[in-house]
Amino acid sequence: MKSLADLKQHINSYGPLILDGGLATDLEAHGATLQGDPLWSARLLHTQPQAIKESHYRFLQSGADVVTTATYQASLSGFTSHLGLSAEDARELLMSAVHLARDAVRTFVSDGLSTMSEKRYFLVAGSIGPYGAFLCNGSEYTGDYANNMSLEELRSWHRPQVECVAAAGADVIAFETIPSIKEGEALVELLREFPDTKAWLSFSCKDGKHISDGSLFTDAVQIAQRSKQVIAVGVNCCAPGLVESLLDSAKSIKDPDTQWVVYPNSGEEWDRKQGWKTSGRQSITDLSQTWLEQGATMEAAAASARLTYLS
């Protein structure tokens, strides 16, 4: 696991890190069928692990510095329920996602394709999606479920996944598409149980000031900043046009030691029956310079299968 000091030094020297794009989008573009699957990309950890490694590799070829594991919709409960695995086999399968991402980076470097190795800083980010992703009902874009759950229930749900990703050696945990301020608080508290682990905390948002459950983004940022283990806070899987307003709304309370992480979609909307609806697409590349000026240091140039370099 790389040190926070090294990460900050690299960002100060070379600028922002480029995150990979949508893993499921890339996998589907190469023949996978994922829509409606309760495990989504995570099923391929069991059935087609090589396809996941190849997808990671393609993102590295496109310029990504950060490889995100295929665990957004993965959970020990999901693996035992939908794959019929034992608890131990489910744990090993979840950990294998980190190993696949690490292997992709290792292969990429050994193939000699990292021609700017002195300026590339590769990170493996262990994806942890919200509880709503397990429910597979679109509630990661509302956070409604948190109203009926305690902080301890949310911590208990996430604990096994965090334990696996951390034990497998992810450089950072990516808590992503978190729709609820309560769930964000639970994750920050849970991190204390893993004192050697760093994370970023990224929220799904409904407009230019609020995360998906209606809470102010500023309040979400303040919760993230309670923990020195949270190295970045930001937004993902929202319309690109919302990002500038969201970051502006919290700039006065952002700690200088906290990085912005930004990786919106391309303006699509999620429909439970139809999947991603492609109307209203926006160019992330056109907006990225503004986010850089606002201090974003971890960004994805696209949420699709191919990245565009940021300058």
Image: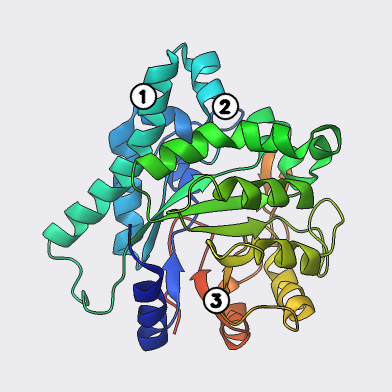
- Whether residue 8 is visible to the viewer of this picture, yes or no, is yes
Q: Disc number at residue 37?
A: 2
Mark 3 near mark 2, Cβ–Cβ under 8 Å? no
- Specify the amino acid type for callout 3: Thr
- Specify the amino acid type for callout 2: Asp
Q: Earlier in the sequence, mark 1 or mark 2?
A: 2
Q: Disc number at residue 310?
A: none
Q: Quick check: 232 left or right of 147?
A: left
Residue 51, image quadrant = top left
* Residue at x 42% of width, y 46% of height: 69
- Element under label 3? helix
Q: Quick check: 301 left or right of 237?
A: left
Q: CA distance from mark 1 to mark 3?
A: 34 Å
User: Depth check: 22 or 204 in front?
Assistant: 204
Q: Position of residue 68 (x, y in %)?
A: 43, 52
Residue linked to disc 1: 47
Q: Is residue 40 above or below residue 65?
A: above
Q: Quick check: 80 left or right of 217?
A: left
- Element under label 2? loop
Please identify, in this view, whether the residue under mark 1 or under mark 3 is nearer the observer. Answer: 1
User: Depth check: 188 or 306 in front?
Assistant: 188
Q: Residues within 10 Å of mark 2 (few under 14, many from 20)?
A: few
Q: Is residue 310 above or below residue 127?
A: below
Residue linked to disc 3: 285
Q: Earlier in the sequence, mark 3 or mark 2?
A: 2
Q: CA distance from mark 1 to mark 2?
A: 13 Å
